[in-house]
């Protein structure tokens, strides 16, 4: 294939590509029968990699009812949520995501019955930690008040509240048993990712197992999943990061966690810690201090939602990169401003401050819990503005180039300080995983949230073409 009229920085170039980039020159002529893609002056970048997301959950959420109903009185928010649930398409199960107790109050089976009594409903809390089922859903899933199962919450009388805490596998198994499980449309979601210029993802789900790896391989083989995948997950995987999910309300035994890390080291694997609070980060670093050091590669901190200067210096000394999510500043920032204290707000989803201390930082989505559009995330990192326009940590702002840099950095280099110029380079021999923007980056970077993608290529094949796919 020949790509005509692309821009790399200040230069206008043509590219000849196969699975790799074969030639780059100011002017190339097509050979007989060679297909041509006109970039129309759009900036050519390496394809983007989202370093932290949850593919199956994100695809399912894309087809779910959005339970984030915005501002208003609690009564108004409940009315709006009830309307969304009652207007949901289909006639059977309803799946909702991103409910926020600040808007509608704490949900349980009885409150959910009031909102939607006629169909089985399950709704996920914005944190991803809790699912809430109404009474019809509990009945369909075969749960009884006499059940005593880890994560299945009961009230003071011993009745099921409908809340399932940190046990997604229990809900998934019961959904399959009730034949109510509808596999998410991975193909459609993969095309959505491609439309944003995303050519690779790291799935960071702690529940990933060997069976999950087989699912990803099957989806890639049959063409449903276009992106290249890096998988982290549980103890039975033989490669990739061990994802350690920390929750300060129920931290594991430190000695057992250290033994778990050491077993992982013997497989040649590194570890990635989910850390959204100061205590979780302190605990993660304490475990690493006791564990066998990694001999190759590097460990990671996922989220790093609250990092003070002292912890930032420790992260830098240990060479631990932080994979953060600036998109939360936009999507959830107004709630953060209402809920958090000054000290917490000052250390929230830091970017520039961590870099000043020598920490390598990369932006990512955490989809479905944060927005998946990388250009929106880049804008959030640059502006630090909430949905209402409030500023959240002005001294943590970075340039759009700096926020984009992480998306262009390979996973195995996230612990290295790589310049934007280095990451954006297009060289002969590199894989033809490419993103062509609508227009020039130098002209559009100030409005990063509004950037559109002209075309995306993976392995030299066009997987998104704005002139055909929209």
Image (spheres, helix red, strand yellow):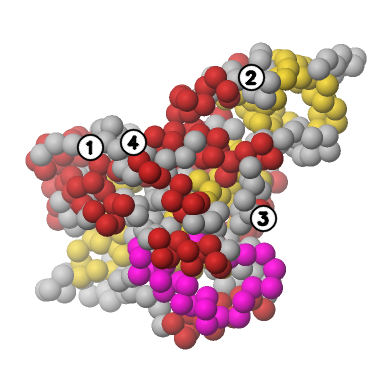
Residue 286 in magenta?
Answer: yes
- The numbered mark at residue 395 is none
Q: Distance between the residues labelled 4 and 2?
A: 28 Å
Q: Mark 3 points at which residue?
A: 412
Q: Residue at x 62, y 51 (%)?
A: 417
For label 4, count other residues whose C-alpha is less than 10 Å away and answer few (under 14), some (14-19) or many (20+): many
- Residue 437 visible in the picture: yes
Residue 116 falls left or right of residue 210: left
Earlier-in-chain disc, 4 versus 2: 2
For label 1, count other residues whose C-alpha is less than 10 Å away and answer few (under 14), some (14-19) or many (20+): some
Segment tinted magenta in the rendering? 274-301
Q: Is mark 2 on a helix, strand or loop?
A: loop
Q: Decide: marks 2, 1 in contact (CB < 8 A)? A: no
Q: Which residue is drawn at 60% across and 72% down?
A: 236
Residue 14 location, quadrant = top right
- Quarter of the figure that contains the C terminus: top right
Q: Mark 4 points at which residue?
A: 385
Residue 425 location, quadrant = top right
For label 3, count other residues whose C-alpha is less than 10 Å away and answer few (under 14), some (14-19) or many (20+): few
Where residue 219 sits: x, y (%)?
A: 63, 47
448 lies above or below 219: above
Q: Name the residue under label 2.
A: 42
Residue 326 falls left or right of residue 460: left
């Amino acid at each position: 294939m020949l790509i005509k009229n692309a821009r790399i920085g200040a230069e206008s170039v043509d590219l000849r590509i196969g699975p790799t980039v074969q030639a780059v020159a100011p002017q190339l002529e097509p050979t007989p029968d060679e297909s041509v893609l006109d970039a129309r002056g759009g900036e050519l970048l390496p394809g983007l990699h989202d370093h932290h997301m949850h593919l199956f959950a994100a695809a399912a959420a894309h087809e779910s009812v959005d339970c984030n109903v915005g501002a208003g009185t609690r009564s108004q928010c409940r009315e709006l949520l009830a309307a969304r649930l009652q207007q949901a398409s289909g006639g059977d199960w309803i799946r909702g995501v991103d409910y926020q107790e600040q808007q509608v109050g704490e949900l349980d089976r009885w409150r959910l019955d009031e909102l939607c009594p006629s169909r089985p409903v399950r709704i996920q809390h914005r944190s991803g930690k809790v699912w809430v089922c109404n009474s019809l859903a509990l009945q369909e899933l075969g749960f009884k008040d006499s059940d005593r199962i880890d994560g299945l919450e009961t009230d003071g009388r011993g009745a099921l509240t409908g809340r399932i805490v940190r046990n997604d596998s229990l809900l998934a198994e019961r959904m399959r048993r009730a034949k109510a499980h509808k596999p998410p449309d991975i193909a459609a979601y993969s095309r959505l990712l491609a439309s944003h210029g995303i050519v690779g993802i790291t799935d960071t789900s702690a529940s990933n197992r060997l069976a999950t790896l087989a699912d990803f391989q099957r989806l890639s083989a049959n063409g449903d999943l276009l992106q290249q995948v890096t998988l982290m997950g549980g103890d039975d995987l033989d490669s990739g990061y061990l994802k350690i999910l920390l929750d300060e309300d129920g931290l594991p035994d430190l000695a057992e966690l250290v033994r778990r890390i050491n077993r992982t080291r013997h497989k040649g694997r590194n570890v990635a810690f989910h850390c959204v609070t100061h205590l979780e980060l302190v605990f993660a670093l304490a475990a690493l201090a006791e564990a066998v050091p990694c001999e190759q590669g590097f460990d990671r901190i996922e989220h790093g939602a609250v990092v003070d200067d002292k912890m930032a210096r420790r992260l830098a000394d240990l060479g631990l990169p932080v994979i953060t999510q600036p998109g939360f500043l936009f999507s959830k920032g107004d709630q953060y401003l209402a809920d958090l204290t000054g000290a917490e707000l000052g250390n929230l989803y830091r970017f520039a401050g961590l870099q000043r201390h020598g920490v390598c930082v990369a932006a990512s989505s955490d989809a479905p819990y944060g927005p998946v559009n990388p250009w929106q995330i880049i804008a959030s990192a640059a502006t630090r503005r909430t949905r209402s326009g409030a500023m959240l940590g002005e001294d943590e702002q970075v340039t759009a180039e700096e926020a984009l840099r992480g998306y262009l950095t390979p996973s195995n280099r996230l612990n290295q300080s790589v310049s934007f110029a280095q990451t954006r380079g297009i060289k002969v021999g590199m894989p033809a995983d490419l993103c062509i923007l609508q227009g020039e980056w130098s002209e559009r970077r100030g409005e990063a949230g509004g950037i559109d993608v002209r075309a995306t290529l993976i392995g030299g094949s066009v997987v998104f073409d704005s002139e055909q796919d929209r």
